[in-house]
Image: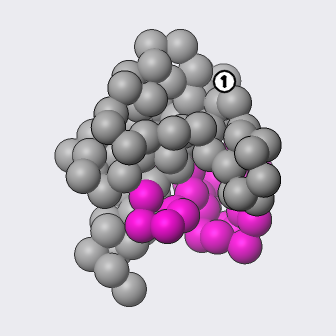
Amino acid sequence: MTAEEQYFYEIGSGIKDAVKGQMFGKPCFKVGKKAFVCFFKNCMVFKLTGEFHQEALSFDGSELFDPSGKNRPMKEWVQVPCDYKAHWKLLASQSANYVAGK
């Protein structure tokens, strides 16, 4: 397990009511059965909206999440590279709030 993947688990485990799960065969965390983050290709992927979605996309190398690799990105999901892991905790918190309806 990479240091980034360990950090993903640390962040997810620290979010209230979050439970581990799988999304597209990749590790994720869910709140109320709704996934809010996953780990893919050494990046953390977040379900976001509004200003946090824009901020996450503004990082170099960030992109809309396309798990199939068939140019069908998921519009609310942003894949953020490990170069920006200093932002992962805040983005995960915002993502959890978003899927929880807060």
The residue that mark 1 highlights is: 101
In the image, residue 42 lies in the stretch drawn in magenta = yes
In the image, residue 29 lies in the stretch drawn in magenta = yes
Residue under the image location 59 percent in, 38 percent down: 64
Residue under the image location 45 percent in, 54 percent down: 44
Among the 4 quarters of the image, the one containing residue 27: bottom right
Q: Is residue 46 left or right of residue 67?
A: left
| Residue type, numbered disc 1 | Gly
Q: Is residue 45 above or below residue 99?
A: below
Hey, which residue is sitting farthest front in the picture?
A: 71
| Residue 71 x/y as whole percent | 74, 45
Answer yes or no: is residue 16 visible: no
Please state, as top left, top right, bottom left or bottom right, where the C terminus lies in the image.
top right
Answer yes or no: is residue 98 visible: yes
Hey, which residue is sitting farthest bottom in the picture?
A: 1
| Residue 42 x/y as whole percent | 42, 67
Q: Residues within 10 Å of mark 1 (few under 14, many from 20)?
A: few
Residue under the image location 68 percent in, 49 percent down: 66
Of 54 and 68, which appears nearest the observer? 68
| Residue 37 x/y as whole percent | 56, 50
Q: Is residue 64 above or below residue 66?
A: above
Where disc 1 sits, the SS reads loop
Q: Chief secondary structure of the magenta span?
A: strand
Q: Is residue 10 left or right of residue 99?
A: left
Q: Which residues are magenta?
A: 14-43
| Residue 23 x/y as whole percent | 72, 62
Of 97 and 36, which appears nearest the observer? 36
Q: Is residue 7 left or right of residue 93?
A: left
Please state, as top left, top right, bottom left or bottom right, where the N terminus lies in the image.
bottom left
